[in-house]
Image (tube, rainbow, N blue to C red):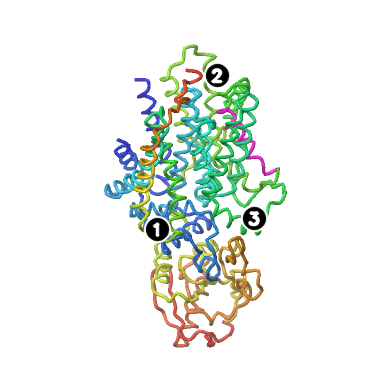
Amino acid sequence: MKFELEKVFLAVFVTVFLLIGIGFLWDNQLKHDFPYGYLASDSFQHQVRAESIKDAGNYRNEAPYIVFGIENVIGYYPPVLYHLSVLFSYASGLPVYDTVYFIPFFGAMIAALLIFFLIRSFNRQVAILALPFSVLVFAGALYTGFTWGHWPSLTSQFFLAAFIWSLGRFDLKKHWILPSFFFSAIIMTHTSEAIFAGLFLMLYLGHSWLIKDLDKKKLLNVVKMALLTAVLSSYYLIIFRGIWMVRQPFQFNVVKAWGAPLLFAADFKALWIFLAVGIITSAWLIKKKEFFVPLVSIALLLFGYTNYLGFTDRAFQLRFFWPITLAFLFGMGIYQLGKVLIKSWKTVYSVAIAAVFLVLLTTTSTAIYPTYQKIISQGLMDNGHWEGLGWIAKNTPQDAKVYFLYGDIYSQDALLRNVKRMHFLVVPDDYIQAINDREIKQRYETEQPGDGGGGAAQRTALLGFEFPTDDPERRPLNGEADICIFDYYIVDKAASQPALAQYNILLANEMLKTGWIKPVFENEIMVILKNENPGADCIEERNF
Amino acid sequence: MVLIVLIILFKAVFFKESFLTVLRTAFSIFWLWILPGYAIMLYWQNLSFLERAVAGTAVGMAVSGIGGYYLGLIGLNLKFHAALLPILIIGITLAFLWKQPASESEEKEPAPAQE
């Protein structure tokens, strides 16, 4: 009966976790008509890459429209998340833009359960009491990890939790294959988390030495594990070494903020009562094998502050999973405080207390402790834009060049890649200046958005790469451009500032006067114009 | 059993979705990750059914993510992976288990340090 109660609570926890995480955000639907609940450009970056891999059938190369129209750019991003989403899309029939968003939530849920089982090997009551803390991954700043598109990092942290689980549940003396699978998956999902996995492995070995459990066999198995990991991830590691470590080398740099909401340990506020008791009461275990479980929480707490040691925003990303990785301290704190009052502890007490905390952390709103914050938003995308972007992708030649006039959502430029064509975007400041000057021009400040992080690397040899965007001749366009040279124009008919939309329409009407620029698509949101004579003057410059 | 729980769970969370979509989504997760992962985890004995299934899901995701990448690179289009990859993983695992019996896994499931 006791065990069944635990299972029932687990089922309730999993349901609540998914419901508040993705259920409400997705309007309680699995399948959407367009990328739903996407709140930032990075989300589209991953969605488009996954779509492009599905289109190509493999991830040998990047799609040219992702990397400034450059051909034969090697697929350089860690591939696992994208492959999981494509695989899941084929099997489930869900669009890739839904599956690639679903996986980080699903991974977080599995990670919370794995940490639960790890804690349970230490103490069943603490494990149950710890579970509710995990829902705080959907509190305030942490929720943006999901909604702003830190999906590879979140999925990699799920594999990091699995790696830690495998170390804790199986002694490395006998089992080294399972940790190898997880370590490889960490490397090939978001490589920076592998550094934290490596650091944790060193702490684990250090603790093994402290408790006199470090022998030759264990060390030999660490070597075997490292070798298998190297073999499994070798192809991608060469790419990582030749591209990412060249383009974004490690530099010691103390970073205290980044361009996203940030969580500090102090933000757990009143819950620190339990966390602190958890840390203090775990300390006495340090010379015991059981210290592995507290070690996980303490290590991950400290790793989250390695932004002071040069790990920059990678340390901040690690904090997204703090509610899962620090859950032990929370459960331990409640348990130890409870034991002061109740000598004979029963599972039913744990379930009851955990249920109360689950309710408190998900349904209340207070400044005393962090709570789940509901987000209901369709996000940046809407049906009209999605239909228009898709029209370009399906109905234009592969080498077509697409020009975006002003649109409210276009500053999140990764979403523009959904046209699946080389694309360009007017710079809003210049546009606004033209409106203020009451000018109609043929040349506007223009940018060519794309994924420049890897320098659009092309492979020249097994270990050799070159970076076309370093060549001044092939650099992405960023400056004044004649807008008459493009093949298609995306013209938004509405904007939050009506003057911008009116100017869009003014410009479009000016182009239509030529007779060779014609509307080919229209819906309630946008008009798409086709230029049948690219290069010819298409705008009579004047004041209005 | 796991599949039924998954369907109920998904229907509770995504209650506005059609039953058919929920069914297919739940089955996809079961087929792609839970089943192959569970098969791999059979090598390690003395885990509870639930822990084996949860950990198996993580293993299934790790192996199919990595495997899918390499199979794609060597020319097997991703559209075939959803059907072939789980069969391949389960087949290789069962062949391995047939050749080499499951580990005694003496260390688990450990008695909880405190009850």
Counting from the top left corner in percent of width and height, residue A193 is at: 58, 45
Residue B78 badge: 1
**First reached walking from the N terminus: tag 2 or tag 3:** 3
Amino acid type of the residue that numbered disc 3 sits on in the rendered structure? Met
**Which residue carries the number 2 mark?**
A337
Residue A295 in magenta?
Answer: yes
Mark closer to the observer (2, 3): 3
**Which residue carries the number 3 mark?**
A245
Quarter of the picture containing the N terminus of chain A is top left
Amino acid type of the residue that numbered disc 1 sits on in the rendered structure? Leu
Q: Which residues are magenta?
A: A292-308
> Could you give the CA–CA distance between mark 1 and mark 2, rounded to whole angstroms?
53 Å
Amino acid type of the residue that numbered disc 2 sits on in the rendered structure? Leu
User: Would you call the spot at circle 2 few (<14 residues within 10 Å), some (14-19), or many (20 or more)?
Assistant: some
Q: Circle 1 marks a residue in which chain?
A: B
Q: Residue at x 45, y 74 (%)?
A: A398
> Could you give the CA–CA distance between mark 1 and mark 3, rounded to whole angstroms?
29 Å
Counting from the top left corner in percent of width and height, residue A348 is at: 41, 20
Residue B23 in magenta?
Answer: no
Counting from the top left corner in percent of width and height, residue A128 is at: 46, 26
Query: Could you confirm whether marks 2 and 3 are on the same chain?
Result: yes
Residue that extends furthest to the top in the rendered view of this protein: A343
**Residue B33: which quarter of the image?**
top left
Mark closer to the observer (1, 2): 1
Identify which residue, A491 or A97, lies in the foreground: A97
